[in-house]
């Protein structure tokens, strides 16, 4: 790990799992805020200004033109759900359905979320190792909020995991088949509640979107609580202090380090011509450390009054689950710390899951 830390990452995707990507991100945004990476075959945007322009650009879309659903998912039940997710669509369909998703994600009070998260932590901690808890906790919390019966929680969370694994780029055929079975079961759950197909798909999205991103947020919160014991003691005293702590963890560590956009037509980004179909990797994590967005951006300070983050996205695709995610992690962290097993439960940092966009700590078990 130490040797790897001495070498900068090979490219911005490798930065996601690098022990210390921050100097590399700084160098990119200061010297090449938008450049074409020939190895990745992607434009790369590292400064706040370029990332923000891209996130608000009407012709930069979340899917490549002509491939609304990835080829591997076409004609499958998983693909049918994928095609209806607001996360994966743009234009009129997205504009018509996003408001309902936002409303759905805002229907719970913070107390509802904290209660569901604490209940999930009490159920899962005694029976799961730390690395599994990171993923199961946010999904179970969301499933509880959505009214899934206790007796169906494990099956539902397993189906959400199968769906996420099967729609990941490069997933093997067996995983796609399992994702399709899971998609059918989850769509039937929504149907039984009287939801139409778009509503049922985006009900799945609330659980699916919470998975990797919130796993990363919880993992980084654990690491930062350990790194800042005095701040951790203060956060143990009050949920609102822990909430500010988690909010700053999200800005500072950016569990979703990057996201992608594709040029739906020839366009200019930061004055640079992009051809139809070209992709842009938006380094959200780098944008958060841009002094143009946050003064003294490398300083970890949960008391920042004006902290700003690109880590939940911005523009049409901004995350509707930000407040739910922060509350879920804050309540879970407090519950585990109050139980007194925090340090035994989470082992030392062993690295990061091998993913290209989410930076999720792996703990020694
Ligand atoms: C309970 C937890 C969460 C829920 C329910 C949730 C839900 C969603 C949904 C439905 C979208 C799609 C919105 C759209 O495309 O219009 C979205 C987008 C997004 N979410 Fe979340 N999310 C959660 C947690 C998180 C966390 C913890 C992070 C990062 C720290 C995150 C980062 C993002 C980002 C960056 C996007 C935008 C992606 C893009 O535009 O490319 N989310 N989220």
Image (cartoon, helix red, strand yellow):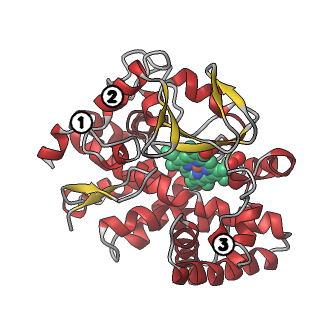
Label 1 CB less than 8 angstroms from ligand 1: no
| Relative to 240, 3 lies left or right | left
Which numbered disc flags the more N-terminal residue, 2 or 1? Answer: 1
Question: Could you tell me which residue is drawn at 28 percent across and 45 percent down?
Answer: 18
- Using the image, tell me which numbered label, if any, was put on residue 228: 1
Q: Are marks 2 and 1 in contact (CB under 8 Å)?
A: yes
Question: What kind of element bears circle 1?
Answer: loop
Residue nearer the viewer, 116 or 273: 273
- Mark 1 Cα-neighbour bin, 10 Å: few <14, some 14–19, many ≥20: few
Question: Could you tell me which residue is drawn at 23 percent across and 44 percent down?
Answer: 226
The span from disc 3 to disc 1 (Cα, nearest Å) is: 44 Å
Which numbered disc flags the more N-terminal residue, 3 or 1? Answer: 3
- Residue 32 position (above or below residue 180): above
Question: Could you tell me which residue is drawn at 69 percent across and 30 percent down?
Answer: 56
x then y, percent, for residue 317: 68, 42
Question: Could you tell me which residue is drawn at 29 percent across and 29 percent down?
Answer: 23
Instruction: Identify the residue position indicated by label 2 in the image.
Output: 300
| Relative to 228, 353 lies left or right | right
> Residue 19 occupies which quadrant of the picture?
top left
Q: Nearer the viewer, mark 3 or mark 1?
A: 3
Q: Nearer the viewer, mark 2 or mark 3?
A: 3
């Amino acid at each position: 790990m130490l040797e790897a830390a001495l070498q900068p990452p090979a490219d911005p995707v490798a930065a996601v799992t690098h022990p210390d990507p921050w100097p590399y991100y700084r160098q990119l945004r200061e010297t090449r805020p938008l450049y074409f990476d020939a190895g990745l075959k992607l434009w790369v945007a590292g400064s706040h200004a370029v990332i923000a322009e891209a996130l608000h650009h009407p012709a930069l879309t979340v899917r490549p033109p002509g491939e609304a659903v990835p080829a591997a998912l076409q004609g499958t039940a998983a693909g049918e759900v994928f095609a209806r997710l607001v996360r994966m669509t743009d234009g009129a369909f997205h504009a018509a359905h996003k408001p309902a998703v936002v409303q759905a994600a805002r229907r719970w009070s913070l107390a509802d979320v904290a209660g569901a998260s604490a209940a999930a932590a009490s159920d899962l901690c005694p029976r799961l190792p730390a690395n599994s808890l990171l993923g199961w906790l946010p999904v179970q919390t969301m499933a509880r909020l959505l009214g899934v019966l206790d007796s169906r929680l494990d099956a539902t969370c397993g189906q959400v995991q199968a769906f996420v694994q099967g729609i990941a780029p490069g997933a093997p055929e067996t995983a796609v088949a399992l994702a399709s079975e899971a998609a059918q079961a989850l769509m039937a759950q929504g149907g039984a509640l009287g939801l139409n197909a778009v509503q049922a798909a985006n009900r799945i999205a609330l659980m699916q979107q919470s998975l990797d991103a919130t796993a990363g947020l919880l993992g980084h919160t654990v690491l930062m609580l350990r790194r800042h014991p005095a701040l951790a003691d203060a956060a143990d005293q009050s949920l609102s202090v822990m909430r500010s702590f988690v909010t700053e963890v999200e800005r500072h560590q950016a569990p979703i380090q990057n996201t992608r956009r594709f040029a739906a037509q020839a366009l200019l980004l930061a004055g640079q011509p992009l051809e139809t179909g070209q992709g842009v990797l938006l380094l959200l994590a780098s944008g958060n450390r841009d002094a143009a967005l946050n003064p003294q951006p490398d300083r970890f300070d949960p008391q920042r009054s004006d902290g700003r983050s690109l880590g939940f996205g911005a523009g049409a695709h901004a995350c509707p689950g930000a407040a739910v995610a922060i509350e879920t992690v804050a309540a879970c962290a407090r519950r585990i710390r109050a139980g007194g097993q925090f340090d035994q439960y989470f082992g030392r940092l062993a690295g990061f899951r091998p993913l290209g966009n989410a930076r999720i700590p792996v703990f020694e078990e």
